[in-house]
Image (cartoon, rainbow, N blue to C red):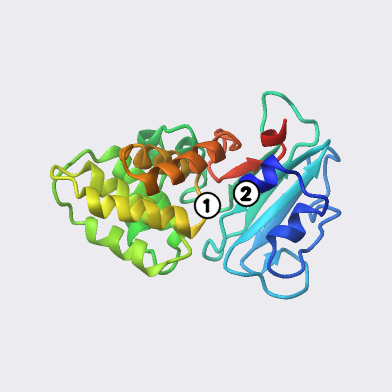
Amino acid sequence: MLALAENPPDRPVAQLIARGEPRALLAPDVRGDTVTPLYHFGPDGPVGAHGEPPGTRQFLVVEAAGSVRLVTLPLPWGTSEVEVLVNLRQSPTGSAASVAVRDPAVGAGLAYMAQGALDMAAQLFTDVEAMLYSKFQNPLAAAAGAYVLIGTDHSRDETYWDPWLERLADSFRWLSDGAILRAVRLLRRASPDREGARKGLIEAFDRGIPFYTLGLVWLVEGLSAFPDDSECVERLDQARRLSWLADMREPFLILDLRQGSA
């Protein structure tokens, strides 16, 4: 991602990121304001589109007004669809792209997660602990619940939900957020497992970019706890530079790939 940001390629970014042939969405699936088109996505890709099934992760590349943004799509999210609103007005105070999950149990609380207001997010989530325990049905919702639990429950002793963090991290190797959550929890324990946290943070980085913006923030903070470890320092440098490209107002990670070359 950093290479794409620092050295803009001649080829379309989507072709360089996708393992297969990327799908071009020239028109929104929901007609409306021409400068704020709305797109819908499901587990099988863009709603109403046909083609090969998507891979483990789905991204949307938005190219407009000279900018290129990589939008992380939080899929699969159970049976819920994901909406992406693209703001072609390029307002200096608003996000160029905004992602929302059409899930009434968590949708409203996700926006507060991006702001770090985890107490408020906990109040708006229907059942934080149930989200974590439903990991096999919806690991992304489980990760959201775990961020809120770790951020609001300041107990430094063993809790009954700690084993669920272990299972979330181990069961979904494509989910870097799971490894981040486990590592941060290990660092915050009364007797921190620094070696376990170190290995977890390195693994989290190597899994790929997190789904949640808060995950990137916690990854940077976690790696910063190991200033004398060359493996952590190298990854910290890259994670920190990646965070400079992120839209911190959004709950799901959106990177401005042209900002790094400005």
Q: Residue at x 67, y 29 (%)?
A: 94
* Callouts 2 and 1 close, C-beta under 8 Å: yes
Q: Amino acid at mark 1?
A: Ile
Q: Amino acid at mark 2?
A: Met
Nearer-the-camera pick, 258 or 40: 258
Query: Which residue is disc 2 drawn over?
Result: 1
Nearer-the-camera pick, 208 or 73: 208
- In percent of width and height, residue 40 lies at 70, 56
Q: CA distance from mark 2 to mark 1?
A: 9 Å
Relative horizontal placement of residue 156, taking residue 34 as reference (left or right): left
Query: Which residue is disc 1 drawn over?
Result: 209
Q: Residue 235, which numbered label?
A: none
Relative horizontal placement of residue 262, taking residue 144 as reference (left or right): right
**Mark 2 falls on what kind of element?**
loop
Q: Nearer the viewer, mark 2 or mark 1?
A: 2
**Mark 1 falls on what kind of element?**
loop
- In percent of width and height, residue 78 lies at 52, 65
Q: Residue at x 60, y 47 (%)?
A: 100
Relative horizontal placement of residue 35, taking residue 126 as reference (left or right): right
